[in-house]
Amino acid sequence: AVLDDGGGRGMLEAGGHKVEWDLKWFSGAGVYRPVPAALRGRAKSDVVVPHWDGRVSGTIRIDGAGIALASAPLTQAHIFGTRYSPGWRWAHGAGFAGAPGLVVEALSGSVRVMGVKSPALTTLGCAGAGRRHETGSLFTLLGNRARLEGALPTGTWTGMNALGNLPAGRQTALGPGLTWTVESRGVDEDYTWRVRARPLDLAVVEYTGPVGERLNCYNTTRADSQFTIAPRDGGPERTYESQGTTAFEVVVEA
């Protein structure tokens, strides 16, 4: 397989099955850095999003059957550092009705600075629909708010082999689902993003970090979300909704 800044191509074959892909992508919003500059190099973990509002074209083949993509929404992100964060919540949204070029991304979690675990810090950024907002300073970072409602699903899981004590795979029991609400204050507008994940859309995998730390990741790429922009000059609020096109995950220590 080959992965570079403009695309990826490769092949996997095992057990009588074969998957091939040949994809090219581009983006217009530039690189997005969720972590403010004041924390970069001080925290043990960082993240960069090279293609925030990416569009991908090409073909994926599964046992010879082709899936064609033409400017489909894509995001490419990379977590790096000397160890994982102790846990985080993350979402990336695209495909908003009435604002096809809008992308929204939020990240909330603790970091370790000089061995000390910080309180949960939250970033939110958006690009497209005539605006760009980023959590670029510690002042903005400390003013952001996030809350998670619902409970992580429990019950029967099927699918992948378990790597640790938590059975990995897709959940088959009903649960309350998850709702994550993020609020951020911009220069002249306030932003509220509400992400809703259905329990049966969640899968769980185990992460093992650079120094052996273990985390459980609950993930879906089929969440719904609602993004509201409220001007502080008294102008009308604007709300954009997406159905099944938001990626969302909750990562907790195992």
Image: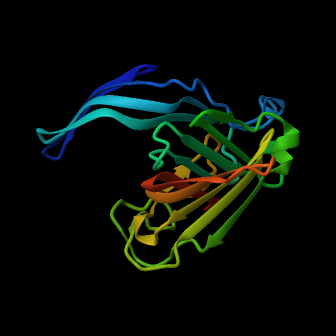
Q: Residue at x 45, y 64 (%)?
A: 202
Residue that appears at 78% across and 33% down: 136
Q: Which of 140 and 83 is in front in this view?
A: 140
Q: Is residue 222 above or below residue 78?
A: below
- State whether residue 176 appears in this view: yes
In the image, taking residue 148 as reference, residue 21 lies left or right, namely: left
Measured as percent of width and height from the top left, residue 223 is found at 47, 59
- The quarter of the picture where residue 58 lies is top left
- Quarter of the image with the C terminus is bottom right
Depicted 214 relative to depicted 209: above or below:
below
- Front residue of 186 and 121: 186
Residue 170 located left or right of residue 204: left
Please say which color scheme the image uses.
Answer: rainbow
Q: Position of residue 81 (x, y in %)?
A: 67, 34
Image coords of residue 191 (percent x, y) = 70, 50
Identity of the residue drawn at 67% across and 31% down: 33
Image quadrant in which you'd find residue 49: top right
Residue in front for this viewpoint, 117 or 219: 219
Image coords of residue 98 (percent x, y): 47, 46
Q: In which quarter of the image is the N terminus?
A: top left
Q: Is residue 253 left or right of residue 27?
A: right
Q: How many marks?
A: 0
**Residue at horizontal 52%, vertical 78%?**
176
